[in-house]
Image (cartoon, helix red, strand yellow):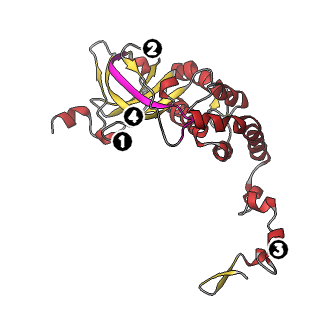
């Protein structure tokens, strides 16, 4: 019998006859694409999806079980994703594929079908590190960082969330003060940051006199540390940590020049 709602029959094309025959009518292809979205994809998008699916099922899936069990992130997987061309896939130039947004969604779906931890690592690298540099960075910043991030040679993290206020930029306590010589001094902390303990590049957001601005920090800078958070109950194959900044000194060339988020500056907050 068919399910009904308000007198209307639901899924009637698939539930006619006996249970056995209805099961037979639900082919594996129907379960893969119940809304028949395949017809709206281009050949390129289908090819990208299938390539990523093959990698995820053949290469990623066998390694996820032990990674989740033992809280182990296998760094070489990011290099493999770089070889596949999925890091920063929508960015045009700088060694990136320049795919459609639909392709990026298909890529993320295939990785997510296997494991959220590596999908998170991939998304942070692509959307939260490479994308801000691509859209708001200088040409020098783009040439310096994006090609190496695209291959997985270096790994990035995104520092927005803080211990006391979560991901609320208007309450941000991390502060960047501009020095007389044009450089910046950054103090503050971030929490629950994907990739931070193993990151080479830190896309950090800080409150300035003019509003919230982004700064590109690098591993090894004096005053910068990123301890790991142990014992998570989920996303266990993802390396999650904190970011501590104690008088981190950076030149103005590390600031994203084309983006100042309006809101409460640290000067306004300190005067309240």
Residue extending farthest left: 271
Q: Earlier in the sequence, mark 2 or mark 4?
A: 4
Q: Which mark is residue 191?
A: 4
Pointer 3: residues within 10 angstroms few (<14), some, or many (20+)?
few
Q: Residue 65: x and y, percent?
A: 65, 38
Where is mark 3, residue-wise? 20
Tell me which secondary structure the magenta stretch mostly adopts.
Answer: strand
Q: Earlier in the sequence, mark 3 or mark 2?
A: 3
Q: Which mark is residue 90?
A: none
Instruction: Find the magenta span and give its range.
Output: 235-249
| Residue found 72% across the figure and 31% down from its top | 84
Q: Residue 232: x and y, percent?
A: 48, 38
Where is mark 2, residue-wise? 220
Is there a contact, CB below 8 Å, between mark 3 and mark 4? Answer: no
* Number of callouts: 4
Is there a contact, CB below 8 Å, between mark 1 and mark 2? Answer: no
Q: CA distance from mark 1 to mark 2?
A: 26 Å
Q: Which label sits in the foreground, 3 or 4?
A: 3
Where is mark 1, residue-wise? 166
Q: Quadrant of the C terminus?
A: top left
Secondary element type, mark 1: loop
Locate residue 69 relative to residue 49 in the image: left or right.
left
Q: Earlier in the sequence, mark 4 or mark 1?
A: 1
Q: Earlier in the sequence, mark 1 or mark 3?
A: 3
Q: Residue 251: name its quadrant.
A: top left
Is there a contact, CB below 8 Å, between mark 4 and mark 1? Answer: no
- Nearer to me, 66 or 35: 66
């Amino acid at each position: 019998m068919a399910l009904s709602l308000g007198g209307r029959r639901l899924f009637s094309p698939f539930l006619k006859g006996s249970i056995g025959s209805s099961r037979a009518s639900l082919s594996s292809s129907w379960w893969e694409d119940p809304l028949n979205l395949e017809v709206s994809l281009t050949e390129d998008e289908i090819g990208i999806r299938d390539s990523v699916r093959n990698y995820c099922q053949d290469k990623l899936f066998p390694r996820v079980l032990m990674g989740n069990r033992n809280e182990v992130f296998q760094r070489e997987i990011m290099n493999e994703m770089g070889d596949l061309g999925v890091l920063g896939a929508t960015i045009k130039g700088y060694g990136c594929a320049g795919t459609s947004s639909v392709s990026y969604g298909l890529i993320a779906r295939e990785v997510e079908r296997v494991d959220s931890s590596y999908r998170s690592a991939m998304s942070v690298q692509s959307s939260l590190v490479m994308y801000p540099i691509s859209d708001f960075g200088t040409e020098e910043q783009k040439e310096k960082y994006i090609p190496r991030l695209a291959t997985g040679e270096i790994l990035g993290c995104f520092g927005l969330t803080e211990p006391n206020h979560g991901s609320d930029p208007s309450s941000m306590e991390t502060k960047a003060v501009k020095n007389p010589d044009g450089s910046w001094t950054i103090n503050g902390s971030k929490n629950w940051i994907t990739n931070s303990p193993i990151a080479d590049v830190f896309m950090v957001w800080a409150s300035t006199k003019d509003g919230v601005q982004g700064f590109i920090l690098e591993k090894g800078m004096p005053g910068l540390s990123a301890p790991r958070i142990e014992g998570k109950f989920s996303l266990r194959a993802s390396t999650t940590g904190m970011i501590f900044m104690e008088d981190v000194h950076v030149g103005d060339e590390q600031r994203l020049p084309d983006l100042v988020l309006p809101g409460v500056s640290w000067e306004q907050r300190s005067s309240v």
